[in-house]
Amino acid sequence: MLEGKDLACVRGERTLFSHLNFTLNEGELLLVQGANGSGKTSLLRMVCGLLVPEFGDILWRGEKIGAARESYHAEMAYFGHAPAVKEDLTAFENLDFACRLAGIPLGRDEVEGALGHLGLGHCLNLPAKSLSQGQRRRVGLARMLLVKAKLWILDEPLTALDQAALQLVQSLIGEHLQGGGMALLTTHQPVMIPGVEPRFLQLTP
Amino acid sequence: MSTLQTVSALLRRELMLAMRRRGDVLTVLFFFVIVASLFPLGVGPDTQLLRLMGGGVVWVSALLAAMLSLGRLFANDHADGTLEQLILTPTPPVIWITGKILAHWMVSGVPLILVAPVLGIQFGLSNEALVVLMFSLLLGTPVLSLIGAVGAALTLGLRGGGVLVSLLVLPLYIPVLIFGAGAVDGAMSGLGAEAHLSLLGSVLILAFMLTPWAVSAALRISME
């Protein structure tokens, strides 16, 4: 389904990685590993289409992601370093906008349900600036549940979360995979997802 | 259909954000009023002189005020990650970029048009000139937002981007200034404003067609 072929990433003068190959199929989890500065975020941004690889191709259902941009972006959801939450909007307004942007306007109940799922049911109408860093990241993760994408690309989704949320997010990823989804993930924390055997992708220069 | 929905959702969000941060909108508006009011203090109370330069002064002030508002066009979205999400929507970038520029104009351009007649009266412009001033701003301020968006996108994430954006954008504003102020002059001197206004209109059409593509390319470079 998702394939990376002979990818290379150059930032400035430095080659972060080269000759990188991977495949990701339905129900699979790919964990990208490497030291700080080894190009994990760059790889994820590359797979999103935010960064053009120096060399090599990324294929989605056999087509280059640049050529199949619209259908690819409709099936993909990205959770980056910044949680994409507007401080001046409430948690509900943030998610409502994200769903409209993805082309699936949802009712208040569904948004409320997703926030409740992440333990933020009481924050629905609070402006995001009054939420903590961890809570904002949870709002961002609630977006992943709502936009119903097949491919999840998660950059450090487990940072700034408390113990309970760590468990919760991992079980959400597990449910997503069991439903036929796929996930590409970077993290420095150990990942324990019941019923899922993650595959590893080691980044070396 | 979905592109229309994207644009309307974006417009709604931008206007909601502007309502929550009224200070940003008012700052630009007050800047406009203050800059225009400084000129009479500098050149003295000669009514004839002020009437002659009125149109030009209001236009220069509008240019500077529009530039002041460019900083937050993409920078806030860039900082909190929503710009990435916009780029990753299935909607073609040119569509939502046009929507964003439209929202920027509604928030920063339209207030200038509404306040401009008050400043025009201060300078003793005739009634006909006031109408032409508003009309020229109506055609010209969208161009300021469109061209400014290219500069804002190019300087995104750069240190000292605010100064750089003025160096990039102000020279490109010159045609708008010449035609806009020329229209008011024409109305004052009785030569008529049609020629200048039609030129301004054609600049608007040209900018509307070309700049979203330039912004899209510039954003792609800035996001890497």
Image: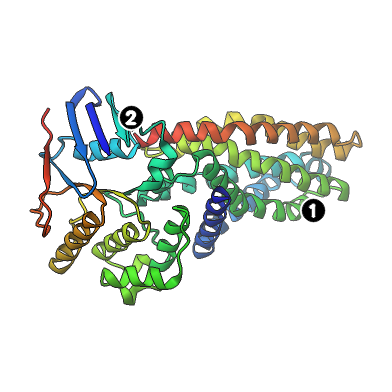
Report the side of A101 relative to A162 (left or right). Answer: right
Occupied quadrant, residue A55? top left
Residue A159 appears in view: yes
| x and y percentages locating residue A123 in the rendered image | 34, 73
| Element assignment for label 2 | loop
- The structure residue drawn at horizontal position 42% and vertical position 41%, both measured from the top left corner, is A71
- The structure residue drawn at horizontal position 41% and vertical position 62%, both measured from the top left corner, is A94
| Element assignment for label 1 | helix
| x and y percentages locating residue A101 in the rendered image | 46, 53
Residue B43 appears in view: no
Quadrant of the rendering where the N terminus of chain A is positioned:
top left
Residue annotated with mark 2 = A52
Residue annotated with mark 1 = B121
Q: Nearer the viewer, mark 2 or mark 1?
A: 2
The amino acid type, in three-letter code, at marker 2 is: Val
Name the image colouring: rainbow
Q: Which residue is situated farthest in the bottom direction here?
A: A122
| x and y percentages locating residue B108 in the rendered image | 60, 51
The amino acid type, in three-letter code, at marker 1 is: Ile
**Above or below — where is B25 with respect to A183?**
below
Occupied quadrant, residue A38? top left
**Above or below — where is A123 with respect to A11?**
below
Q: Residues within 10 Å of mark 1 (few under 14, many from 20)?
A: some
Quadrant of the rendering where the C terminus of chain A is positioned:
top left
Dot 1: chain letter:
B
Q: CA distance from mark 2 to mark 1?
A: 54 Å
Q: How many marks?
A: 2
Residue closer to the observer: B29 or A193: A193
- The structure residue drawn at horizontal position 67% and vertical position 31%, both measured from the top left corner, is B206
**Above or below — where is A105 with respect to A54?**
below
